[in-house]
Image: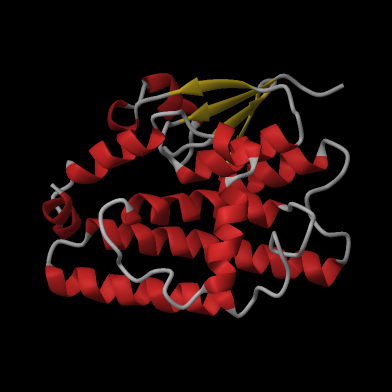
Amino acid sequence: MLPKLKLISHTLCPYVQRSLITVIEKQIPCDREYIDLANKPDWFLKISPLGKVPLLLVDDEVLFESAVICEYLDEITPDSLHPPDALTKAKHRSWIEFGSNLLAKIAGFYAAKDQETFEAKRLDLIANLELLETQLNASPYFTGEKFSLIDAVYAPIFRYFVAFYRYQNFGFSDRTPKVNAWREALLQRPSVQQAVSENYYDLLDEFLKKRNSFLAELIK
């Protein structure tokens, strides 16, 4: 019997999304509670060591950090979303960490204050996507037909690029056909679609336009 689970979330957080995708894929009963990160409630700050989402409440225990949460959810349920081979699993974990680093670079891109910094961040993102391209030799997912935890991690990353292309072509997909195909396959998956609200892109658009950044000025 599974413990009582509750995921403390935020509507736009990509780290929450990867956890929710895992919950949905594994069909795990799990309550959700959304908080305002601009006005974090006291109860949340008392139980969150880093003051970040997601948190997973497991009965009376608290887990934090999305990678840990996803691993835990996978381990307490059958049919693992990790490959069985130890080396392949380790490789997946390595590229999951690369994905987290890519999210930080995305944040640097949309937060850049001036055109010079913005352009440097844009080119750095392109270089990282081209590096990711070299790792893809299967389809439709990272290792072929089977959806894995690494796919749950990259789906929220790719959602950002869909949002960016709503404004203009920044060149992110010009030389990455395998990444592009992977992105499209992930964004069509029901668990990925269900991990965000129907107005997700409108909320993200509002968030990006409110920032004091070069991108915000570009898209207003």
Report the side of 121 relative to 44 (left or right): left
Name the residue located 56 percent from the left edge and 37 percent from the top edge: 193
Which percent across, then down, holds residue 134? 60, 80
Which percent across, then down, holds residue 153? 59, 52
Which percent across, then down, holds residue 30? 67, 23
Vertical relation: 46 (above or below) 184: above
Vertical relation: 199 (above or below) 82: above
Which percent across, then down, holds residue 51? 42, 37
**Image-quadrant location for residue 19:** top right
Please name whichever residue, 105 or 193, is drawn nearer the observer in this view of the structure: 193
Vertical relation: 104 (above or below) 20: below
Report the side of 8 relative to 39 (left or right): right
Report the side of 152 relative to 13 (left or right): right
Name the residue located 22 percent from the left edge and 73 percent from the top edge: 119
Report the side of 76 relative to 8 (left or right): right
Name the residue located 73 percent from the left edge and 69 percent from the top edge: 138
